[in-house]
Amino acid sequence: MAKILVVDDEEMIRKILVRVLMKAGYEVIQASGGAEAIEVLKSGVHLDMMVTDMKMPTVTGIDVLKAKKDLNDLTPVIILTGVLNEQQDYTELNRLGLGAQDILYKPIDLLLFLDAVKNKLV
């Protein structure tokens, strides 16, 4: 069973994503923000995927991706964002060498979300 870290400061969104993933048979770890997500990464727990929001107070999704890179963590990442600027998002992530396997925009289509997760875990 794949283990997925879900990072989002919006509790309702996080709970919905966790519930959807658990119903699909995944093991899920939650983080309510970037600092908590970095602690999970530093703990060395094995993750098969990370799903993270970009815009979070204090410690952003970019900060989480930078910490992941510093830890040489190769876990695939799906980015969630409410900012609809796909080209700029990909350009910024690639410029920083923080790549993500996919960017999904809020409000999230849950079927599209599950498809993205399944495709990235193969």
Image (cartoon, rainbow, N blue to C red):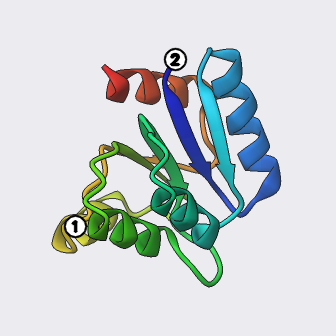
Quarter of the image where the C terminus is located: top left
Percent position of residue 51, x then y:
51, 46
**Pointer 2: what residue?**
1
* Residue located at (53% from left, 74% from top): 60
Of labels 1 and 2, the one closer to you = 2
Percent position of residue 22, x then y:
69, 23
Q: Quick check: marks 1 and 2 in contact, CB under 8 Å?
A: no
Percent position of residue 19, x then y:
75, 29
Graded by Cα atoms within 10 Å as few (under 14), some (14 to 19) or many (20 or more), the crowding at tag 1 reads few
Q: Amino acid at mark 1?
A: Thr
Which numbered disc covers residue 91? 1
Left or right position of 52 against 21:
left
Farthest-out residue, right: 12
Left or right position of 94 against 39:
left
Q: Secondary structure at mark 1?
A: helix
Q: Amino acid at mark 2?
A: Met
Percent position of residue 96, x then y:
22, 74
Q: Secondary structure at mark 2?
A: loop
Is 13 drawn above or below residue 66 in the view shown?
above
Graded by Cα atoms within 10 Å as few (under 14), some (14 to 19) or many (20 or more), the crowding at tag 2 reads few
Q: Nearer the viewer, residue 93 or 22?
A: 22
Q: Nearer the viewer, residue 104 or 99?
A: 99
Q: Find the distance from the CA under tag 1 to the CA under tag 2.
A: 33 Å
Farthest-out residue, bottom: 58
Q: Earlier along the polypeptide chain: callout 1 or callout 2?
A: 2
* Residue located at (47% from left, 63% from top): 42
